[in-house]
Image: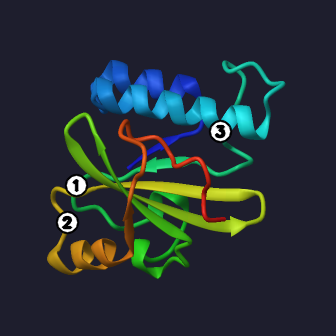
Amino acid sequence: MHIVETLADIHALARKGAVTPAMAAHLERELHLLRDSLEPEVPMELFSLSVHGPIVLLRPGEENLAGLGMRGNVRDLAVEWVSRRRIGGAEWYVIFVLADNDYMLQIYVPRDGLSPDFAEYLAELAEDDEQSDGRLPEGQPF
């Protein structure tokens, strides 16, 4: 599991080779969009999702949320919305969990390596991303 709250987190993951260049670019775009929506006055280098909810990248086959200090797994969450995205040739599910009015978890789950029942669960919930480059649709459903 990788947790992203800042631009520095994305750069560190990219330097270590923990994310592909396409995923790093995608995450940077998402972080910019979130900063522009939530705290546009804060410089990008200082912006953090720590108070808004992190972006979480699960490894293939991973479902456990202990790395976030949570019990159980992804299926135990009250999911708001699931998006299906293609990022750099790889397919991902993005699970949005609204913990309260100001805290939203975005959990990225790679399609590869999913157990059959988890894959079926996500496929039933998922909506295809309407943006060809993997960005969030303009009008989110919440």
Cβ–Cβ below 8 Å for labels 2 and 1? yes
Q: Amino acid at mark 2?
A: Leu
Query: The C terminus appears in which quarter of the rendering?
Result: bottom right
Tell me the residue at 52%/49% (across/down).
137
Tell me the mark number nearer the camera, choosing from 2 and 3: 3
Left or right: where does residue 94 sit relative to residue 71? left
Q: Which residue is mark 1?
A: 60
Q: Nearer the viewer, residue 86 or 62?
A: 86
State the residue at coordinates (30%, 23%). 21
Q: Position of residue 88 (x, y in %)?
A: 25, 34
User: How many residues crowd mark 3 within 10 Å: few (<14), some (14–19), many (20+)?
Assistant: some
The three-letter code of the residue at mark 3 reads: Leu
Q: SS at mark 3?
A: helix
- Name which of mark 2 and mark 3 comes first in the sequence: 3
Verify CB contact (< 8 Å) between mark 2 and mark 3.
Answer: no
Q: Amino acid at mark 1?
A: Pro
Residue drawn at (21%, 43%) of the image: 90
Looking at the image, residue 116 sits to the left or right of residue 14; the answer is left
Q: Position of residue 65 (x, y in %)?
A: 44, 65
Where residue 34 is drawn, which disc sits there? 3
Circle 1 sits in a helix, a strand or a loop, which is it?
A: loop
Whole-angstrom CA distance, mark 3 to mark 1, is: 26 Å
**Going from the N terminus, do you reach mark 2 or mark 1 first?**
1
The residue identified by callout 2 is 114
